[in-house]
Image: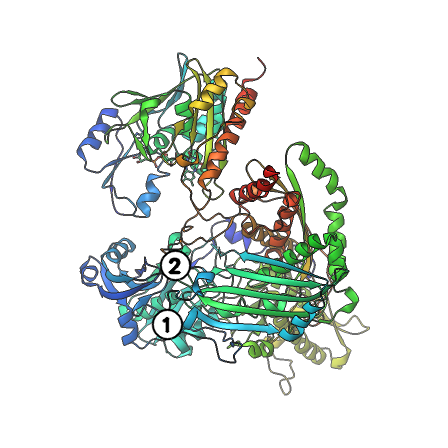
Amino acid sequence: MKAFDYHRPAAVGEAAALLATLADSRPLAGGMTLLPTLKLRLAEAPALIDLSRLSEARGIKQDGDALAVGAMTCHADVAASPLAKALIPGLAQLAGSIGDPAVRNRGTIGGSLANNDPSADYPAAVLALGAVIVTSRREIPADDYFVGLFETALEPDEIILAVRLPVPRAAGYAKLRNPASRFPTVGVFVADTSAGVRVAANGFALGVARLPEFESALANHFAPDAVAGIHVDAEAFSSDIHAEAAYKAHLVGVMARRAVSTALELRGPP
Amino acid sequence: MGKAIGIGAAPLRKEDFRFLTGRGNYVSDLKRPDMSYGVFVRSPHAHALLTGIDASAALAAPGVLAVLTGADVAADDLGGLPCGWGITDKSGEPMKEPAFPLLAQGKVRFVGDMVAFVVAETLEQAHDAAELVAVGYDALPAVVGVLDAVRDGAPLLFDDVPGNLCADWELGDRAATDLAFTRAAHVARLSLVNNRLIGNPMEPRAAVAEYNAGTGHYTLYSTSQFPHVVRFLMSALVLKVPEQKVRVVAPDVGGGFGVKQFHYGEEAVVTWAARKVGQPIKWVADRSEGFVSDRHGRDHVTEAELALDETGRFLGFRVATLANMGGYLSTFGPNIPTNLYAPLLSGVYVMPQIYCNVKVVFTNTVPVDAYRGAGRPEATFLVERMVDVAAAEMGIDRVEIRRRNMIPREAFPYQTPVLLQYDSGDPGGCLDRALVAADVAGFGARKAASARSGKFRGLGFSTYIEACGLAPSRFAGRLGARGGLYESATVRVHPTGQVTVLIGTHNHGQGHETTFAQIVSEKLGVAFEDVDIVFGDTDKVQFGMGTYGSRSLVVGGAALSKASDKVVAKGRKIAAHLLEAGEADIAFEAGVFKVAGTDRGRTFAEIAGAAYVPHNYPLEILEPGLEEQAYYDPVNFTYPGGAHICEVEVDPETGTVTIVGYTGVDDVGTVINPMIVEGQLHGGIVQGIGQALCESAVYDESSGQLLSGSFMDYCMPRADTSPHMSVATHSTLCTHTPMGVKGCGEVGTIGSPAAVINAVVDALSHLGVTHVDMPATSNRIWRVIQNAALPRAAE
Ligand SMILES: Cc1cc2nc3c(=O)[nH]c(=O)nc-3n(C[C@H](O)[C@H](O)[C@H](O)COP(=O)(O)OP(=O)(O)OC[C@H]3O[C@@H](n4cnc5c(N)ncnc54)[C@H](O)[C@@H]3O)c2cc1C
């Protein structure tokens, strides 16, 4: 790791100003992704702006008919939050399934969304729930936020402060882990929301995406069998040493069915 | 007052206090005055000509003390890394043995090959400067797989090694085996791959070296499983400096699994550079560096045929294996897929004829050498898969075919057709017990229950034997070993009666400090806590060959047992003098020398005191002091073995294999500490499960880049995917080791892969699946199911 300057501003404005003025500086959240890349010299950052003192980026609250999660909230806190478990149990469950305990206690929802790893868990939930990403400048609907592989709508000096997730009628997540990295090979999040059924999957070559065919099938009938026969095109996936594209495409169907079952279980009897 | 804790007891491990409280002392913990830091520049190419190295920018960088390259190695006339085994081609010619230079000479042969060494005052300066070393490469086509490497027109690693063939080696009677096939009622055939593995001990390799210009002494601290061997190889053959001026210390070492039982170029370069720079140097591999420089394991491609008579009795076994050596010969490299593989092909069976041909092949990959089990897991996997294939084809129950062919207990000692004479064993007894422990009788009901929830359940058996306790030197010498394989131990009794043991094996997780103390406590009757075990320092310990091949207890423990006996013999003489009795009348029991049949006696501590304060002592006939040394060279290998039964459930939707039951009944001979044996079995089994289900070193076929070069892509077995294991021992005593011990370090790794894969194949057998290669990842199993389902769908 090369030497870098370290800043820990207390105000959002100050943090944004540092990012805007210090060339190639980067926000630092849990550091679970950023620090290893610096250590391996895969990236260089002359300055890191630690976001841990920004009070706007903390806490889990109910905000009208949505759950608001501060960007600096670590995965373990979402998993353990009584509020999250009560309002969107599928989200709490997802958070509790990320990586390992060390990662869950450092890694943050803001860091995960800013990074937009095609295999990350949170993006599927955020997109399927139709969440809003609240930043230092604006509010970005999830449908506009995820641009591509490790790419988002964020400007370089824009900071995620919170994520506002509308409370769904039912939601569930299912994934198959890559046994080495433990990131999902494919994960599917289904949500029965006031804006209709939304389904999103990670693991695509270009990152998280919605699954319209699954959405309409489930809109008709929110049950595992409803999505049974849907064909998923392998073209949208890339093969790697762990999984071939055809397998990943197949897994979308399997995980969608399992996610619906989970959503129904978590919702409980009507 | 402590008490004696002897053989068969299970005290907690002595060494764990320091490990669990963070007081271990590892190479990377060391700090020496004026210590500088070294970083290796490694080849990013799998195969390339070196067109030049410009170190000027690196040398001008802040804090840089030296940049050493292959030219400096050549100028100082340093030797290459020696290979400790020379095998012989079937033509009678010695194997091809190209030089393995410390730093590349003209060419690089794998990604990770060492090109330069940068030394600077701080680690960051060394890293920065390493990025400034300008190395010119002219990339050449690379070859990574054995099948490609032996093809006509394949890129050649060495100009003088045609066909990339190190040796075309054979064992067994070819003609007699061919004849057996002509009499066969059935011939079963199997092609398989034994996947390449990376050991990944928790502690990466590291070295700290310093040179004392006043005395001309070198000291190397290294993460080594065998410091004396490193001292010999490095001083005599690589650096060409007097052996007595070199001290090698292997302090606490965080796991080895074989990865640390070789003499590595880094050790020699750091030591050499410490003298050139005039300051101590520390090098610590990071994990990424370990992936491309720690010696890899396994990597075979095999075709085999088993001839059987109409009753399912084995008549002959014909095996052709291509074994990957990587880019150069490592310390034991060519020995592993030959001498430690083919002689195990008889398994636990009466296998009247065996012929095995092994082509040992160079490729543009990390050199391959011993990894826990080393050759024997490869042999066992092949034999035990082959037996299942034959059973399925002939419609014979898998347990029944094993029983029909198994060497019965009363047939030991048993001479196989491939060199080995098994001295003892009871494979049938192990199997009987395992069948009960695994509740094989209840399997049908469990399978039906799985089927009701849409899962396929399978049961797999592996009845195996291995050869360990390396090794009888004379025998090994005939097979090409260039060193001895004895072990040595000194038992140093202090005037207080407390004991220091100096032993040539190395403890890096196996619990030797406990096991060896139990042996001494048993033999001398001294308290368990009054025995300390010293190892890993060539200036303290006389000599030794180190720890690998399940040899520490078998060979080192035997030396320790003999040295302890010598202490007792001398103590008896001293006691006879003090008690004014004949030596023959002195009995030694529970730590007291007594005149037999009387209550007159002297404690062990009193005798020790008399030996060092020889006021009343037979100085005319006996030297003072109470310290004895023994060297031990075994007369045969030892042959642990056993029966493993694995039960799996396969989710056909995802292809995921879950191990739902695992039972091992192993014959490891005398058990010194059952808790430690159980731990070794657990660890070994999990390592075997790792090979069977998830681990695999994958190279890109065209670029020769290691694709599984981090834990993001190389899948280690984890606690949460490891099954509950039921392990038990069913021991027959080794007939030739002093305590009847056989060794237990590798059995788990050797027995388990076949048990797991046999279970997976069983679970899928209703689809017509007859073989699955390792690792049985969910994608691979899903693919196997898809392919099996295709013709059915067409029906
Ligand atoms: C071993 C391991 C296993 C993992 N397994 C999983 C898994 O199974 N599933 C999964 O989804 N993830 C997994 N992760 C990723 C982890 O959960 C984190 O989500 C991820 O590392 C990013 O979060 P972080 O807080 O650590 O961000 P950092 O590493 O601190 O930052 C990541 C990037 O985001 C930027 N950034 C951070 N916060 C903000 C912000 N508020 N606004 C703008 N930009 C910001 C940083 O500048 C940087 O570019 C794993 C990570 C590791 C190390």
Callout 1: SS? strand
Chain letter behind tag 1: B
Q: Is residue B781 left or right of residue B274?
A: right
- Residue B563 versus residue A156 in the image, above or below: below
Please report contact status of discs 2 and 1: CB closer than 8 Å, yes or no: no
Q: CA distance from mark 2 to mark 1?
A: 16 Å
Q: Residue at x 39, y 11 (%)?
A: A64
Q: Mark 2 — residue?
A: B30
> Is residue B584 in view from this perspective?
yes
Corner quadrant of residue B635: bottom right
Q: Residue at x 53, y 43 (%)?
A: B783
Image quadrant for the C terminus of chain B?
top right
Q: Mark 1 — residue?
A: B218
Mark 1, residues whose alpha carbon is within 10 Å: few (<14), some, or many (≥20)? many
Amino acid type assigned to the residue bearing label 2 in the image:
Leu
Can marks 2 and 1 be said to lie on one chain?
Answer: yes
- Residue B282 versus residue A261 in the image, above or below: below
Chain letter behind tag 2: B
Q: Residue furthest bottom?
A: B620
Image-quarter location of ligand 1: top left
Callout 2: SS? loop
Where is residue B397? Give x, y as percent: 74, 52
Q: Is residue A226 left or right of residue B53?
A: right
Q: Is residue A139 left or right of residue B781?
A: left
